[in-house]
Image: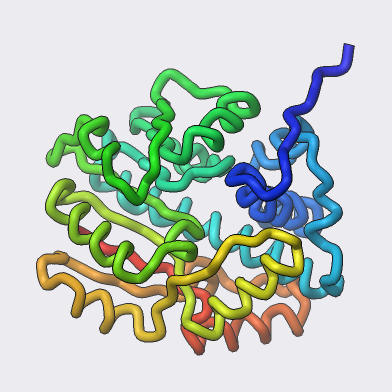
Amino acid sequence: MEKVKVKIKRNTVQETVMPQLYAKCCAMKKWPGLFFDNDCRRIKSMIDYDFSRLALGFSPFAVEMGALSAACRQFAFAEEIRGYLKGRPRAKVISLGCGLDTVGRQADNGICGFINIDFPDVIELREKVINRNERERDISADVRAGSWFDDIAYDKNEGAVFIASGMFLYWDRSDVKRFLRDMSERFEGARLVFDAQNKKGAVSAQRALLKAGIHAKVKFYLDSPEKELKEWDMRYKKISCKKMVSDYRKLDKRFSFAARSIVWISEKNNMAQMNVIDF
């Protein structure tokens, strides 16, 4: 008997995690051997959703670039997690606004812990399509509210690496600033890794969402990330602003010349950032 798939309703929070899942699956299909996500295609197969609508109105090249961006972002997050765990192998890997992401598993050292935090309906979906291991737990919460802080048994000596993939994009700038301040006070010694882009990139992201029929409002961007973040809070121990692709891997020649050119332009103009803050 065929297993019943989980249906995703239109214009819900659950739907906002579909584009990244679709993009990563496209990347795995187009560039086998370059990206490793053993979960995304299995998860996609368990979901009842018209993924083809996410490509409507986009050229094949635009779909390719979306796939490349999603896969490179996940690769960069995995590298940052591995780097932190080398110094603190028993740290917690905490995914903020986790969606259906399993990037932490790609950096699993066998002894670290995992915590996934997102809205209740997203966690509900996650628990239907992703099996947790014995070192993993899910927390249903509005990440922005910070009520989940007390649910984290944080040990400064063991540490924690927080990742936020695409989450801040939908927040007001003042909310991001307050949230980072609160995190620095609560999680001294931890690290936060998040992606961002400049204003032009945010406008482009908004246009892409609307084309896909997803009515989420893009609000947050950083034109000069290192300068702006330093001005927010002088207590940050270290701020690193990296290029999402070239600071983590070479642009393989299997990517088209046009794709490599777009990546180069995007990185030069801060449209593809990975920002790392040590609290």
Q: Quadrant of the C terminus?
A: bottom left
Question: In x, y percent, where is residue 92?
Answer: 31, 37
Question: In x, y percent, where is residue 274?
Answer: 43, 68
Q: Quadrant of the N terminus?
A: top right
Question: In x, y percent, where is residue 243?
Answer: 46, 75
Q: Is residue 146 above or below residue 242?
A: above
**171 horizontally vs 126: left or right:** left
Residue that extends furthest to the right in the rendered view of this protein: 1
Name the residue located 47 percent from the left edge and 39 percent from the top edge.
119
**In the figure, residue 215 lies in which quadrant?**
bottom right
Q: Is residue 73 above or below residue 60?
A: above
Question: In x, y percent, where is residue 265?
Answer: 59, 88
Name the residue located 46 percent from the left edge and 47 percent from the top edge.
97
Name the residue located 21 percent from the left edge and 34 percent from the top edge.
150
**In the figure, residue 250 lies in which quadrant?**
bottom right
Name the residue located 81 percent from the left edge and 49 percent from the top edge.
51
